[in-house]
């Protein structure tokens, strides 16, 4: 009996034990303490958990790496020993992530629309609801504002901007995660807006014009409106800005000339005309309004200020003096005023003040003249999280003003307190809830302003649908307002209901289907049972427009016909106008381009000029005449001059810099010398024999040193190629800079050569693998680690196939790259491997570590990451007959589940040869011409190849 109890006790003692629930975070480690009989192993591992230990004997800890594929939620981890199994619920915590990619900015013409395609990706581990927000001063439309994205899923969204009324617009696009309020992504798109097609081809001195004519005819009579705007540079010193219109009511608009130290302008409104100007410290105006003329002016020189005003009603003169200390400015002044009816003369004093600093902006005036007058206004620079703004005025014994204090309680909630002072006192409190990542907002107000004030407003917006309304009470009575609208690309619908003094139903629709535009609005008074409405229909094509509009009210229909003509464009300012308004603020560089045979920089009698040589400053170019003379017109500044259009054996070796001053001509000859050069390629001499053999790869981005008659350095491109020119003839030595090589590489033997005028010689420079000296003798049981050679360079987004040979009995082998840890899995006898994700740019260290039997060994290598395609596509032959078979081979730098080639609507899947090689065939088109083949990996285009079909 005792023996049976002992056996039962032992059975319970070795029962498999493990926690019921464990939490883990993506990118971290999960440790599971276990105890059981024999070896405890994991028989079912959730996706994304990478085992770091194979099993535990008796009691210990099972370790797992929580990889990027681990999704949020609870996942079963099944453990097993020699007797039983047990399930541990692994709870992966939610990690939000949003990636937003925007295209580079574009250019368009005013009045047109420009579309951009945005890409939004969920980089988190849970389904996310991403909301997009656009901040732009242009009218815009998003194809989708809210996206439901699974982990790793990406969607494209179209952003359409209407280009109106600006020279440049900066649109900021923000993407907000609904899982975590702190997670967001943003992108910036800059759009250049041209006033008309071809405006970018005009010179610095150009004028832009716009002419418009609108005519209207109805039962009430005919009307017209004529507008003309002209603006731009009259010269480098004077600019013109004007927009004048002539209507049946009279002249309206403005016209201004702006110079370096003066301005002259004219403003007109029906019945009001004003001429104003500025010259140095003087400013003045003359205005005609209501049949009366008034004149005024100011003079400001340093802290002194004089001001006067004359009119038929009286005159005013003031003199002040400014005191300034930091951001505070105070201007005390005296003032004298004369009134004509009734005749009276008054004297007084005043004080103007302004305070500007990082926290506050205040300005105001206090004046005593026929009574006390006060005006004060200001605001805090920041309104978030706490802000203040307000203004107050006192005149004739009456106070008026308002002040508002706001505070943000959290990201979505703000409240404010407003005090108003007019004929009655008012105090209002407002609480608003506007979550940035949700489609709704709500606000409420309570207070008093001549009576009780209550208000509640709400809005819901999802895609093109918007619902909203307000409900409340003010001193005039209760009110209610509701509306619903739906907007699409080409049309919009809106319904509304208001109930205040009257109850009214509203409905409207408007649409744009070029060249047609239309709108219809209806209103129905519920109490009076009266219907009214209006409509409009327009046809626009090019510069012409025709329209018809109507209005129905109180049983009467009124119609009006419309016609419009608009012409816009621009032209270079005529040279006569440029010179009449001061000319150009430029200087000149002129001189002779010649062959400097003796290299002394001075033209000798036997040194010929170089006709047709091209002297360049940036994109500006001047061609030398038959005598080798050139002339460049430049704005003031310092410019490096270059000479092109020469034979390969001639070059401007000297650094020539022209310092241009306005109105002056700088004489500057350009001595061109005989030069030599070379070209070559850097390669990795893997067998260290000094000869370039097939299979030995080029070495990109290595730095080359040239020493001899003169010293130079150069950097090889991505194919290991380099060119060095502009050298003096002589003997040179080429070598590699060891600091630019991998630490497992060393420079090969230097190359010496004599350079003479003529064709550029070809040079091969070798780098060799470093021979490692053995400093420790290993036994078969010792732990040793050897890496297979890494690729020379990889682009971001690629996968590195890492292979390591391990001697001994390793318990754990892993790799470290860019802060990430990757376990290496057994792939054969002593071979371990994994695929490592490559991100970022520059040089990265790949470290591999092996541990086992109390030993640890590690090795490392450098990997260069440079921008480039993730795959290449080869099509052979490239020149084909119609219908001939094309052999396709794709070499990948990352694994893909679907590889295909597209030729227009034709899609050709490629067959897998290995993880990084895919092949296939297609038949060439039967129509002669050039065709582009597109390579797609999992639906994303990564490379192209061209083929040509013979006639």
Image (cartoon, grey):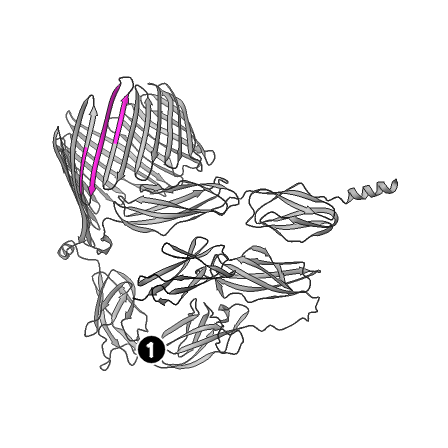
Label 1 element class: loop
| Magenta-colored segment: predominant secondary structure | strand
Taking the image as shown, residue 420 lies to the left or right of residue 868, namely: left
Taking the image as shown, residue 541 lies to the left or right of residue 325, namely: left
Q: Is residue 546 magenta?
A: yes
Picture coordinates of residue 457, whole percent (x, y) = 39, 27
Along the line of sight, the residue nearer the viewer: 188 or 219: 219
Asked whether residue 228 appears in the rendered view, the answer is no
Along the line of sight, the residue nearer the viewer: 755 or 864: 864
Residue 819, relative to residue 357: is it above or below? below
Residue sitting at x 48%, y 64% = 793
Along the line of sight, the residue nearer the viewer: 164 or 559: 559
Residue sitting at x 18%, y 74% = 626
Residue 29, relative to residue 769: is it above or below? above
Q: Is residue 535 magenta?
A: yes
Circle 1 sits on which residue? 675
Asked whether residue 863 appears in the rendered view, the answer is yes
Picture coordinates of residue 77, whole percent (x, y) = 64, 45
Picture coordinates of residue 424, whole percent (x, y) = 33, 21
Residue 102, relative to residue 855: is it above or below? above
Read off the magenta span: 520-548
């Amino acid at each position: 009996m005792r023996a049976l109890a002992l056996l039962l006790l032992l059975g319970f003692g070795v029962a498999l034990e493990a926690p019921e629930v464990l939490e883990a975070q993506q990118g971290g480690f999960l440790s599971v303490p276990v105890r059981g009989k024999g070896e405890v192993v994991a028989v079912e591992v959730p996706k994304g958990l990478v085992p770091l230990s194979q099993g535990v004997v008796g009691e210990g800890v099972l370790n797992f790496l929580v990889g990027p594929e681990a999704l949020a939620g609870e996942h079963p981890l099944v453990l097993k020993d020699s007797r039983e199994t047990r399930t541990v619920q692994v709870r992966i915590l939610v990690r939000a992530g949003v990636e937003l990619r925007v295209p580079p900015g574009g250019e368009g013409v005013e009045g047109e629309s420009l579309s951009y395609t945005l890409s939004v990706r969920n980089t988190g581990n849970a389904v996310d609801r991403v909301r997009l927000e656009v901040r732009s001063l242009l009218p815009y439309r998003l194809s989708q504002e809210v996206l439901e994205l699974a982990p790793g899923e990406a969607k494209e969204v179209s952003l359409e901007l209407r280009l109106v009324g600006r020279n440049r617009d900066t649109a900021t696009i923000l993407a907000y995660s609904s899982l975590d309020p702190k997670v967001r992504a943003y992108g910036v798109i800059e759009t250049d807006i041209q006033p008309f097609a071809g405006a970018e081809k005009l010179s610095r001195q150009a004028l832009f014009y716009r002419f418009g004519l609108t005519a209207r005819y109805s039962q009430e009579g005919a009307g017209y409106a004529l507008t003309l705007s002209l603006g731009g540079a009259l010269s480098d010193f004077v600019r013109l800005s004007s927009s004048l219109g002539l209507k049946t009511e009279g002249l309206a608009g403005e016209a201004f000339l702006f110079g370096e130290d003066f301005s002259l302008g004219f403003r007109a409104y029906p019945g009001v005309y004003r001429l104003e100007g500025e010259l140095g410290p003087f400013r003045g105006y003359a205005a005609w309004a209501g049949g009366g003329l008034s004149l005024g002016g100011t003079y400001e020189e340093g802290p002194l200020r004089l001001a006067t005003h004359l009119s038929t009603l009286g005159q005013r003169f003031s003199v002040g003096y400014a005191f300034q200390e930091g951001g505070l400015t105070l201007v005390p002044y005296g003032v004298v005023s004369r009134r004509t009816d009734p005749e009276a003369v008054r004297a007084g004093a005043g004080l103007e003040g302004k305070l500007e600093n990082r926290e506050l902006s205040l300005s105001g005036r206090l004046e005593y003249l026929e009574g006390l007058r006060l005006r004060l206004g200001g605001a805090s620079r920041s309104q978030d999280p706490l802000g203040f703004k307000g203004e107050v005025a006192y005149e004739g014994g009456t106070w008026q003003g308002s002040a508002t204090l706001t505070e943000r309680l959290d990201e979505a909630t703000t409240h404010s307190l407003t005090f108003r002072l007019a004929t009655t006192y008012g105090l209002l409190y407002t609480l608003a809830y506007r979550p940035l990542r949700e489609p709704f907002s709500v606000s409420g107000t309570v207070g008093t302003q001549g009576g009780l004030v209550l208000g509640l407003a709400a809005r819901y917006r999802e895609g093109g649908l918007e619902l909203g309304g307000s409900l409340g009470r003010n001193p005039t009575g209760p009110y209610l307002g509701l509306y619903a609208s739906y907007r699409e690309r080409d049309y919009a619908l809106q319904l509304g209901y208001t109930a205040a003094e009257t109850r009214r139903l509203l409905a409207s629709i408007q649409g744009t289907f070029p060249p047609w535009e239309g709108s219809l609005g209806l209103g129905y008074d519920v109490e009076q049972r009266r219907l009214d409405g209006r409509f409009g229909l327009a046809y626009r094509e090019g510069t012409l427009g025709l329209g018809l509009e109507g209005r129905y009210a109180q049983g009467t229909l009124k119609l009006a016909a419309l016609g419009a003509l608009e012409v816009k464009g621009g032209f270079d300012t005529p040279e006569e106008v440029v010179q009449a308004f001061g000319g150009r603020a430029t200087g000149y560089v002129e001189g002779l381009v010649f062959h400097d045979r003796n290299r002394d920089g001075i033209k000798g009698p036997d040194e010929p000029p170089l006709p047709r040589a091209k002297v360049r400053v940036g994109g500006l170019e001047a061609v030398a005449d038959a005598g080798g003379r050139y002339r460049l017109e430049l704005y003031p500044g310092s410019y490096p001059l270059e000479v092109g259009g020469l034979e390969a054996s001639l070059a401007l070796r000297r650094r020539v810099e022209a310092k241009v001053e306005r109105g002056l001509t700088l004489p500057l000859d350009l001595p061109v010398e005989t030069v030599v050069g070379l070209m070559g390629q850097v390669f990795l001499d893997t067998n260290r024999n000094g000869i370039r053999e097939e299979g030995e790869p080029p070495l990109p981005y290595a730095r080359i040193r040239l020493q001899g008659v003169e010293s130079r350095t150069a950097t090889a491109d991505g194919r290991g190629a380099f060119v060095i020119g502009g050298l003096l003839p002589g003997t040179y030595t080429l070598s590699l800079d060891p600091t630019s090589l991998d630490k497992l590489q060393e420079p090969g033997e230097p190359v010496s050569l004599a350079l003479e005028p003529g064709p550029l010689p070809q040079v091969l420079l070798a780098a060799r693998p470093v021979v490692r000296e053995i400093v420790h003798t290993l036994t078969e049981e010792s732990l040793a680690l050897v890496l297979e050679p890494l690729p020379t360079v990889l682009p971001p987004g690629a996968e590195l196939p890492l292979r390591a040979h391990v001697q001994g009995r390793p318990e754990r082998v892993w790799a470290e790259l860019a802060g990430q840890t990757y376990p290496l899995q057994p792939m054969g006898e002593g071979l371990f491997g994994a695929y490592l994700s490559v991100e970022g740019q520059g040089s990265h260290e790949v470290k591999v570590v092996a541990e086992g039997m109390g030993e640890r060994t590690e090795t490392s290598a450098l990997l260069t990451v440079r921008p480039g395609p993730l795959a290449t596509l080869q099509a052979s032959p490239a020149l084909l007959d119609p219908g001939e078979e094309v052999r396709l081979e794709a070499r990948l730098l990352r694994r893909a589940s679907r590889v295909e080639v597209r030729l227009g609507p034709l899609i050709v899947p490629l067959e897998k040869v290995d993880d990084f090689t895919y092949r296939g065939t297609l038949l060439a088109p039967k129509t002669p011409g050039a065709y582009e083949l597109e390579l797609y990996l999992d639906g994303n285009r990564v490379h192209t190849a061209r083929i040509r079909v013979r006639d």
